[in-house]
Amino acid sequence: MTDPDLPKLFEDPIFDDCTPQSAQPWVGTYERLRHLHDRIGSPVPLLAGGPAEQQRLRLLLELTAMADPALFHVLFLHQCMTIGPALDFGASAEDVAELASGRSVGAALMTEVGLGSSSTAIRTEAVYDPAAREFVLTSPDAAAAKYPPNVGMPGLPRLAVVSARLHVSGTDHGTHLFLVPLRGGDGGPAAGVAITPRPRTSLLPLDYAAVRFDGVRVPYHRWLADGAAVSAAGQLHDPLGDPGLRTARSTGWSRFAWGAVTAGLAAAARAAVALALPHAGRRRTVDRWGAVEYALDRPNQQRLLFGAAARALAATAVARQVTEVSWRIPPGGGRGRGLPPAVMGELAQVKVAVDVLAHEAVDRCRAACGAAGFFSENRLVEYQALTSAFRSAGGDNQLMLLDAAWHMVTGEGYEPPSAGRRPPGAGEGAEPDWPLLLAARERALYERLAAALRGAAEAGEEPSAVWHEHLDTAQAFAEAHRARVTLRMLAGQWRPEAGAGPARGEGSGEGSGEGGVRAGLYRLLGLEAVLPHADWYAAAGLLSPAAAEGLGRELTAVCRRLVPHTAALVELLEVPPAVLKGPLAGVDYVRDLTE
């Protein structure tokens, strides 16, 4: 925890109960947003600062995700998805200051309701009016409505980044971005803006709406021109020189979301573990033979919760690697080309990896807590709402995996693991090279997919038809690649140094101290990545039959060795007590659940 003052913001009674109780729970969400803005707002946004200020923003987002997932959703859209492109595409200093101070709450309006994956095929139009030197924003039909931004609540000034196809002198110049006031100082919709609130949703309840535009006038200075300009003669000059490149650049603002979302998802997972793991050490259970023990003494609980802890910390390590890249804004923003496609592809994969790890961690915590994990007062279901939402929000996980698989298998910036680097067969109880084992399976899936595409090309078949026949293999390939990359990264941070002594076994020291705990969690992740495919590894000769058969027993043993070091593990989660609320966070959960 790098800033001891930020956790204190969440000690205020306004955060004591963030459960969605009223018919319009977002009213409280925006009150808490105002609470934060009153304390951190300034004319200079945190995102525009150096590494220290951006680290402070990341910590603020992490703490907010732990304390109130719905508030995190509003905050990251404001701080990153509105202020980010405003800075990067050249908004006026006045508009940036209005957002940074919190006088207007930001929103991001890109996707449209009538076309899946619509961000690259936007139909909202911005027609340049040379006489007025303005843009006229129009939704051609209901299918072009922006859905589902959280802008339905009246009474709040809202300033949104809106994507629209720019038409100048009758020519379509691709997707551009505009800053558009949706609601003025009185909180009512701006002229020409139709905001249709949607019914309350059960998970992550916010003021979602559908938004359409009917001749909305946007001043020239609120075009996020990014170095482009329209001459007095009505000619567009775009430094990118191509509508396709401009659309790619405009849709690239998703990187600001990925830097924020990964931080928040990982933080929510850590908070879930910080609630569930100590609770399991206090909760008494009885088994079928009548033996009464604390839940954490049960092997099934150990596997659930230590697996959750490993995933939460892995998600955090992965997420914190990409913050700087995701939020990088060149000096004098407004004339950039954005990040290279390969970097954007890597960031998209990281978003998927972190969401999957965080979702699995929270799901395990809920399962370990039994019925108590279902209720909002214990926060776990709210954390899972966040991880569930971002399976699709911020880019659909499956589509991004399939996109990554396509780019890798067609040879764009991907080198498959070497066929010659085969891990030696490991005996039972020995420590395999987990990344090398995962690389072998990744290579096999790559070869299967590449062979199918080559065969189709030789037969003159349409690549799309063959691709759609092999979607399961493609997704498994992308997942295997990400698992291997993640474990390889963690190996450098968590695995004991060579020659540092034994890393496993009773009395070996696994689990003692921070390094020992991380080593145990690394081994746990390796076991859980390989175990579902144990038969394949044995058939391929990469694990002996005895070693493959013993993976489950070794997993149980690793968890058992971590039990005495639960307190040290909880410390690694970096979850301040101020953000943990609800009965499960208390010492006497029975009293807190019944009084």
Image (tube, grey):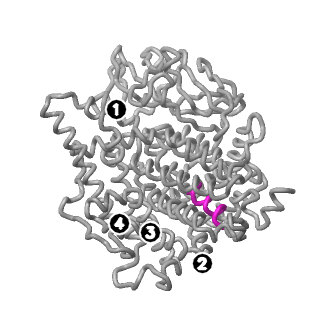
Question: What is the spatial separation of the Cα atoms under label 3 and label 1, in whole angstroms?
Answer: 43 Å
Going from N to C along the chain, the mark reached first, 2 or 3, is: 3
Q: Is residue 429 left or right of residue 106?
A: left
Q: Where's the C terminus, which quadrant? A: bottom right
Residue 439, placed above or below residue 105 = below
Name which residue type carries label 4: Trp
Q: Which residue carries the number 3 mark? A: 522
Name which residue type carries label 1: Arg
Q: Secondary structure at mark 1?
A: helix
Range shown magenta? 267-278
* Circle 3 or circle 1, nearest the eye: 3
Mark 2 Cα-neighbour bin, 10 Å: few <14, some 14–19, many ≥20:
few
The residue that appears at 44% across and 58% down in the rendered structure is: 318
Residues under numbered marks 2 and 4 in contact, where contact means CB atoms less than 8 Å apart = no
Residues under numbered marks 4 and 1 in contact, where contact means CB atoms less than 8 Å apart = no
Q: Which residue carries the number 2 mark? A: 564
Q: Secondary structure at mark 4?
A: helix
Q: Which mark is residue 246?
A: 1
The residue that appears at 49% across and 51% down in the rendered structure is: 262
Q: Is residue 577 left or right of residue 507?
A: right
Going from N to C along the chain, the mark reached first, 4 or 3, is: 4
Going from N to C along the chain, the mark reached first, 3 or 1, is: 1
Q: Residue furthest left?
A: 458
* Residue 273 belongs to the span the image colors magenta: yes
* Circle 1 or circle 2, nearest the eye: 2
Question: What is the spatial separation of the Cα atoms under label 4 and label 1, in whole angstroms?
Answer: 42 Å
Residues under numbered marks 2 and 3 in contact, where contact means CB atoms less than 8 Å apart = no
Query: Is 392 in front, or is 471?
Result: 471
Q: Is residue 551 left or right of residue 153?
A: left
Q: Which residue carries the number 4 mark? A: 434
